[in-house]
Image (cartoon, helix red, strand yellow):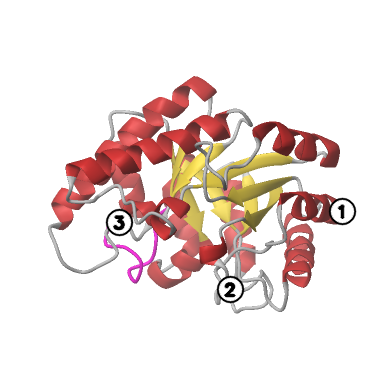
Amino acid sequence: MKSCITISLVEEARGGPFVLWDGLEKSIAFAAELGYDAVEIFAADFAGGPESIDAAALKSMLDNAGLKCAAFGTGAGWVKHKLQLADPDAGRRSTARDFVRTIIDFAGQFGASAIIGSMQGPSGHTGDLETARGYLCEALQDGGAHAVQYGVPLIYEPLNRYETRQCCTVAQGVSMLESLATDNVRLLCDLFHMNIEESSIADALITGGKHVGHIHFVDSNRRPVGLGHMQFGPIIAALRKIGYDGYLCAEAFPFPDPHEAARQTMRAYRYWTGT
């Protein structure tokens, strides 16, 4: 298992569960200094706008630091543009899928996956859930098929009941993925959400099995690992049992500050993985 840390470039998300916030160059350099293997980036724009990332510059930064890019989040589609893949309006759904494709295309240059989290909708508790789930499945099929050309999967994240009515547990996520026409979608298992929804996080990871494609490595209170009450021994054992060799990525509140949160996560990663 490899180490990873989140970098947010979206000002509207400040205060959210992302560890590093000081821009790409400083954040990548700091992650490398601490010994991380990769970064996960939450960015505002991938389509050439004023907030777009320069791909060549990012490649240079990563190469100089000896880091990989594990994944790119799509959440700015919701945070900035209020796009969701289960929007009742067909035009808005199409725009949301197009936004996701731009991220898949950008991420593909780095051998990285795009993550579908907050864009999955619906976050409210009204409306036709079956229809919304159908729209989400259509979008995942589209995105998973689009990502095949880059040799990477699309990543889907079940969220807790307070953030979505789509899939809230790993078992629900597995059931949905197995219903898709594509086999190129994997699950992101976020330990914070799992702490709310699963009776046993370890058992849920075993249920996820081959479908588990990414882990958000965070404690029960969404602070860095070691600052809550989660029991990580059974979690790491379960990941080893299913043969997981992907990233353990810190998506946590930058508590007490970004640099110490990054250091604490690396200490915890080394302790639990024995590296």
> At 31% across and 63% down in the image, what residue appears?
164
How far apart marks 2 and 1 lie (CA) works out to 27 Å
Q: Quadrant of residue 15?
A: bottom right
User: Which structural element holds mark 3?
Assistant: loop
Residue 12 location, x and y as percent? 51, 65
Q: Are marks 2 and 3 in contact (CB under 8 Å)?
A: no
Q: Which mark is residue 33?
A: 1
How far apart marks 3 and 1 lie (CA) works out to 37 Å
Q: Left or right: where does residue 250 sit relative to residue 179?
A: right
Which amino acid, mark 1? Glu
| Residue denoted by label 3 | 121
Residue 87 location, x and y as percent? 23, 51
Which of the two marks, 2 or 1, is nearer to us in this view?
1
Q: Magenta span covers which residues?
A: 157-166
Q: Nearer the viewer, residue 118 or 179?
A: 118
> At 52% across and 45% down in the image, what residue appears?
45
| Residue denoted by label 2 | 230
How far apart marks 2 and 3 lie (CA) works out to 28 Å
Which amino acid, mark 3? Gly
Tell me, yes or no, whether the highlighted magenta stretch contains residue 24.
no
